Image (spheres, rainbow, N blue to C red):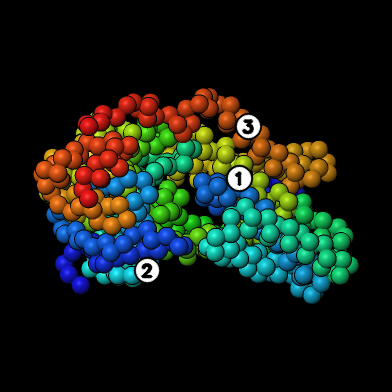
Amino acid sequence: MTDALLAARHLSFTYGNGLVLTDVSFEVHAGEFVALVGPNGSGKSTLLRVLLGTLQATEGEAELLGQHPAQAQQRWRVGYVPQRARMQPDLPATVREVVGAGRLPRRGWWRRGGARDRTAVNEAIASVGLTDMAARRVRELSGGQQQRVLIAKALAGEPDVLILDEPVAGVDAESQRQFREVLVRAVRDHGAAVLLVSHELSAVADELDRVIVLKGRVMFDGTPAELRERGVSLGVHPDDLPFWLEALR
Amino acid sequence: MPWPFDRGYMQLALYAGVVVGAVAPMIGTFLVQKRLSLMGDGIGHVALAGVAAGLLAGVWPIWTALVIAVLAALGIQMMQRRGVAGDLALALVFYAGIAAAAVIAQLARSLDASFIGYLFGSVFTVAPSEVWLIAGLGVVIVVAIAVTGPALFAIVVDEESARVAGLPVDRLNALLAILVALTIVVAMRVVGVLLVAALMVLPVGASQVLARSFRATILGASAVGVGSVVVGLTLARAQGDLQPGGTIVLVAAAAFVIATLLSRRPRAVIGASPVDQHLPVEHHH
């Protein structure tokens, strides 16, 4: 075990007869902003599930907070925004209620919230630029604003690790800008480790410490500058991924 | 008490009904948001098998219904965890329950008025001891919701991230299922197993289109539930011998329809409101 907050060591995963992940190894440390990219079916979501402990690796091992993911303690230190996370369209809840739900694991779900919890929830709402809408019902918000609510919910627990699975697919420019600033603050000010799975990295390209390219196995693990040297742009369209992956062979 | 609650049997019906009207929609709010609106129906039919078993064994049917309903609720949870689709698990419990109720009631030779009373409720004949039991179980349900409500809400919002963050999602879901079973047993004498699910769901439908928050939805649904009971009992008394379970649920259904009309929310806006969903995303090639 190391001080890495997230780690994969020679990790393989087989689904049925197919090998989804082959000998995947990498680490993410505190204060690192890492993007995980790859075409559809490249094993990104499977890898996240193994790292989060909801799937068991066939070979090799994963670490979450320096522990075996399925048995990891202090799981409230992990903030997670699942892929295509959408709230029920008729959810009769306010922005503050939804973001407050993200604070619950940290404060203990059976305890009443205190002043510190309320402050953390307000700060999380402010960080995504929704303070004016805190009392609004989430169903009245636009898609981009709803995504920001879910990101604020993940931030409300003041996580040490933030994992986001395609959180900003198709949202407006203002939401993308807010999103970039939130992630940069989480990394620089709070020393969190951020693992961002996304097709669309143009908004955060300048802020990334590392990019990991996955296609069943790790095709590339290095800085954005090193990736650019190989002729790959980070603002790639998902349809282009197979082409620029060829360049990495 | 003034009319219509000037008689002893009407007062007992009011006490039992108010507890059920307040509690059933509280549990129902979580079921509606988890898309499990029909869970009350499934467990209700199993509870009926429990009633029949109680009549066969010569035990107070409410106790046997309670035990069987809790076991069925946990069974549904277990099937869902093993990958059986939620509606299929409910269908199994629903049909097995009603079939078992028919067979056992036949064995007990109890397909009579008392058995029918559990089907549609018979709140005008409720005994003081039953009112105490209903009130006691009602307090248990309210305390359980007060303690676990925030965690159940977190699961409603996003079960996957709640699980990742370490909330005991399976245990909380099992607890919710047990609370559904308790609520059904509490409501069985008031509206009957055939209509109990309606009292869990219809007030929520009325409340959630108007309420400004989740908390307000729960409180509003409870208020609609209590109001439906009071108006329903009054209608049943005023018209002589109308079935009170039926009038209560019809009032709740009317509240749902009226609230939906009042909300004036265009259907197209629900859910897919986001204007910005269709804005093109800038790509750098």
Please identify, in this view, whether the residue under mark 2 or under mark 1 is nearer the observer.
Answer: 2
Q: Which residue is mark 2?
A: A58
Badge 3 crowding class, 10 Å Cα cut-off, few under 14, some 14 to 19, many 20 or more, is some
Q: Is residue A208 above or below residue B174?
A: above
- Work out how far the residue at label 2 is from the one at label 1, CA to CA, in angstroms: 44 Å
State which tag comes first along the sequence, 3 or 1. 1
- Choose top left, top right, bottom left or bottom right for residue A201: top left
Image position, residue A173 (x, y; %): 25, 29
Marks 2,3: beta carbons within 8 A: no
Return the residue nearer the eye: B211 or B166. Answer: B166
Please say whether residue A143 is visible from this viewpoint. Answer: yes
Q: Is residue A161 above or below residue B233?
A: below
State which chain disc 3 sits on.
Answer: B
Chain at tag 1 = B
The answer to whether any part of residue B179 appears in the image is no
Task: Name which residue type carries label 2.
Answer: Thr
Horizontal arrangement in the rendering, residue A238 relative to residue A235 (left or right):
right
- Which quadrant would residue A60 be assigned to in this image? bottom left
Relative depth, front residue between A172 and B238: A172
Tell me the residue that label 3 is attached to.
B257
Give residue A154's position: percent from left, percent from top.
30, 50
In the shown orientation, is residue B35 left or right of residue A161?
right
Gap between marks 2 and 3 measured at Cα:
53 Å
Residue type at mark 1?
A: Val
What residue is shown at x 32% (from left), y 55% (from top)? A216
Residue type highlighted by circle 3? Val
* Label 2 element class: loop
The one nearer the camera, A31 or A59, is: A59
Q: Which residue is mark 1?
A: B201
The x and y percentages for residue A10 are 26, 67
